[in-house]
Structures are given as C-alpha cells and as structure tokens.
Image (cartoon, rainbow, N blue to C red):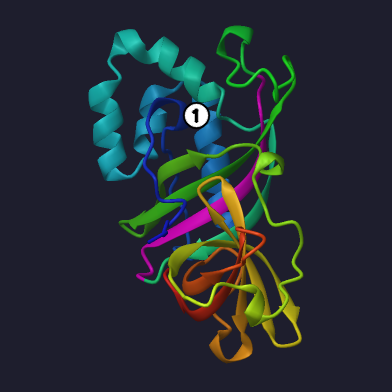
Amino acid sequence: MRFIVTGLIATVLTTAAFGQAVASPSPTAESLRKTFDACNDAVKAKNFQGVLSQMSSPMHKQIAAMIQPSQRTPFFFNAMLSVPISYNVESVSPGKDGKSASMTLMAMLPPLPLDMQENEKTQTPGQPRKREQTVAFVLEGGVWKISSIDTGINPDQRPRPKDLKMGQRADYSAEVSTDMGGVILRMEKQDAGTVYVIRILDEEDAVFVPAEHVSSNFVTGVVISFHAAQNQSDPLKYWAQSAKLEK
C-alpha cells in the first residue's frame, strides 16, 4: 500500500511551528498568511517568548522544554534559515473538522552557509533556495495557531510524469493493486475524466479519474486517495478505479 497525507508532519528547530491570533476562525489565505508573517517577524526579532506565544499548545510545550536559554542563539540561527525571503501561497485546505487547515507555499529561502550545503550539485552557493513549504494550523480558543511547518525540496527537482497524456485503460496493469494518496497540486479536465497531479513525499504522480468518480470536492490543496492501476511504461501515471476525499 502506498499512502501519504502530506503537510501534517510536526518538526522542531529549523522548521519550528509558530502562529498568531486571527480575528476570524475562517482559514482564508489572507488570515493564515498574516499568521505566518507574524511568526516570521517574531523569529527575525529573536523574541523567544513571542514565538512560544504563537504556537499551538503541544508545540509550545515541546519547544519550551527543548530550547533552554543557552540554546536560543543556535535555535534562532537555524530558524532564520527557514524564514522565506519571499513566497507565494499556492493553496489553502480547510480540515473536515473545522479546527484545522493547511497552507502550501512556494518559498525562496535564504542561502545556506557553505558548511551546511545539503547538495552541492544542485544548490548554487550563496543563492536563495526554492522550496515548497506546507504550514499546518489548528484552531485553539477561537484563534489559529501554527502546529507545524514542513519544508520540502526544490519542486523543480521532483520526479514527475513525462506528460499528462494518460492514454487508455489498456495502457495500465490489468490488476488494480495500488492504494495511494496525496495533496492535489493541479488538475486537468479531459474528455472522459480528470487528471489529478498529486504530491507524495517529494514525488509527483498523475492519476486519471474517470468522470463517474470525479467529485466537485476534489480541488487544489485537498488530500485525496485512490485505488488505482499503474501505467506500464510510466511508473508515475495511474488509472483510478475509485477516489475519495481524505481531508
């Protein structure tokens, strides 16, 4: 079985979770972006108590316990490396429970110091790093708090299908044996159905969903899962027998 729900991975230190009270509980791009910007301002100001006050309760406790006063200098050094120079909001996905949401960003992060270059072959020293970030929020006491920030790789380097020409059902394995899922990055309506491009970890997969299984709830930013057959020539293409909304 191949299944992943992205954007809900709690991280500490370099991708610590922050948040800010928002007047309206509606998880709009504007309200969540204000929260995200405020958390970044707290990091830039090296205001540790300000950062803690913006976190969800579990992360507040975890970071407060882990980061002692003597560790705050390296904490802020690492945290600053995950504060975007600039970013664009790609999608906002409300949770089914009304008390959670996630926001996907395309961010330009500061350059890493030379001794921290994670991949010298693909990272130009001294240049900003393009990364996808998924920020998870929870609603506490009527206000949004950030519960986690997941920083991925440069999306331009992700493995992806050669194209979105999905062919016919006969181009896929006869056995429908793959259970998979991920967040919808984009979609393309075709004559007999819709192709959904989803992210699974640091990989993109294209799934053709016949019209009878397509839902109006399948929109960019939500997580959907499929029972599908894999393409015989392109392992990143699938033909779905069923599809359902996960969050």
Q: Main secondary structure of the magenta part?
A: strand
Q: Which residues are drawn in magenta?
A: 97-111
The three-letter amino acid code for the residue at tag 1 is Ala
**Residue 28 visible (yes or no):** no
Q: Quadrant of the C terminus?
A: bottom left
Q: Is residue 141 above or below residue 210?
A: above
Q: Position of residue 210 (x, y in %)?
A: 61, 85
Q: Quadrant of the N terminus?
A: bottom left
Q: Is residue 157 above or below residue 103?
A: above
Q: Is residue 120 above or below residue 145?
A: above
Q: Residue at x 73, y 15 (%)?
A: 126
Per the image, label 1 sits on a secondary structure element best described as: helix
Q: Which residue is the extreme one toward the bottom?
A: 212
Q: Which residue is mark 1?
A: 42
Q: Residue at x 30, y 38 (%)?
A: 59
Q: Position of residue 44 (x, y in %)?
A: 55, 23
**Residue 127 visible (yes or no):** yes
**Mark 1: few/some/many CA within 10 Å (<14, 14-19, 20+):** some
- Count of labels in the image: 1
Of residues 169 and 205, the one nearer the viewer is: 169
Q: Position of residue 24 (x, y in %)?
A: 48, 62
Of residues 135 and 132, the one nearer the viewer is: 132
Quadrant of residue 234 within the rendered picture: bottom right
Residue 56 shown left or right of residue 109 in the figure: left
Q: Residue at x 37, y 31 (%)?
A: 12
Q: Residue at x 58, y 84 (%)?
A: 214
Q: Position of residue 97 (x, y in %)?
A: 35, 70
